[in-house]
Image: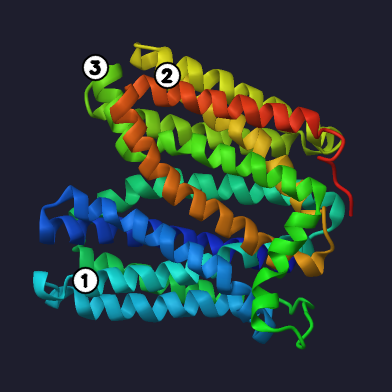
Amino acid sequence: MKMNRNYNLLLTGQSLANIGDVLYIVSIIYIIFELTGSATAAAFMPFTITSSMFISNSLTPLLMQRFNLKWLLAGSQMGKTILLIGLAFFSPQLSMANFYGLFLIISLVALLDGCANPVTQSLIPNYVKSEQLLKANGITETVTQLIQTAMWFVGSSLLIWLAANELVWLTAALFLVSSLLLSFLDTVDFTPSSNQGKWKQISQGWKTVSTSPVLKRIVWMDVLETIAGTVWIAAILYVFVSDALFADEKWWGFINGTFFLGLIAGSLFCLRFSDWIEQKLSQFIFLGAISSSLVTIFFGLTSLPTLALFFSFLVGASSQIKNIPQQMVVQTSVPKAQLPTVFTTLGAIGTGTFGIASLLMGVLADAFGIRGVFILSGILLSIVSLIAYKGRILLWRTV
């Protein structure tokens, strides 16, 4: 599908940034583990990232009052470039004495990421025609998942030839090129009232969500789905492979890989049948949710690694078949001028929920067994499908 210059620049710039994000995380995990030898220290990194992104999502509306969306996005990538250059100089001198300085950099990078994500989601409807929006979302998701799938393998492989510090330099270069590309985007009009106080600026998105029946329903679905999705974090999935499947560690990687392949397949399905899906958004949101529910329960009950691979693939595909149409509903449920604050609110809710739920799910896995949390995940997704079915009249493009 032929897209316009702005969308192509946005997709290319953000794809380079996404590649850089994976390489950055790979290098950081390696640096932390080499210095401390502690898996707990490495596991604390996602908690730091999630907490910082929650704060960033909450405060981004203040930045939107002062900066154009295009420059806010390009500036966030330039800020990450500067932080990564600082990390490249800092990491050779890293020791247990100044170890916490590393987590300060991780937190600052996550603050910038939390700002960039809702801005990107808000810009897409401004850069593509209404009839191309579902296809644009499908292309964006497909490219993002392809990068996620490939770059974890590439990043870990690069550590064979490059030192972690050299990988950080490569990441900084990718962020620099990304920021330069994004600076060529056309300006998007977003001029919220400058008379609003700071609290009103921060709370504007929350008010929009709370007064919109469709967005309130989507928030409930997202919260439940985010809680359900924490069973797929690396730590819980590793325990499932070991204690439920009695399989080697390599199956942990295989299941992760097939899950990402399922995400890609779901994105490609939405891209291929976009015209059909666009006419039946609510049906596909329900179908994706109920399919995810059933397959997650089957995954939790299986003892065969090969069947687990198959179910993992289906979970990934089903989630995309739900999420891409749902993304379009959000993008068309309010005027474009309100999208930035709406996406920052949804981002804050998502990151906050994930941070708390990931800790809770680990406790539940210890208390009720690893299979139990996957069955619980399936039950939560069945509630999501029920909410989608009851709100099928609302889950439709309205703008």
Q: Amino acid at mark 2?
A: Gly
Toward which corner of the image does residue 220 lie, by quadrant?
A: top right
Q: Position of residue 290 (x, y in %)?
A: 65, 23
Give the mark nearest the N terminus, 3 or 2: 3
In the displayed structure, 83 sits above or below 161; it is: below
3 vs 2, front mark: 2
* CA separation in Å, label 3 and label 2: 13 Å
Q: At numbered mark 3, what does the secondary structure look like: helix, strand or loop?
A: loop
Q: In the image shown, does 358 or 63 lie closer to the viewer?
A: 358
| Nearest to the observer: residue 377 or residue 318 | 377
Residue labelled with disc 3: 246
* Residue 333 spot, x, y in % from top left: 82, 53
Q: Amino acid at mark 1?
A: Tyr
Tell me which residue sits at (27%, 60%) in the image.
27
Q: Which residue is mark 1?
A: 100
In the rendered view, does 97 fall on the left or right side of 10? left
> Of marks 1 and 3, which one's residue comes earlier in the chain?
1
For image coordinates 71% across by 40% down, the residue present is 271
Image coordinates of residue 78 in percent, x first then y, are 48, 79
Q: Residue at x 51, y 71 (%)?
A: 178
On residue 300, the disc is 2
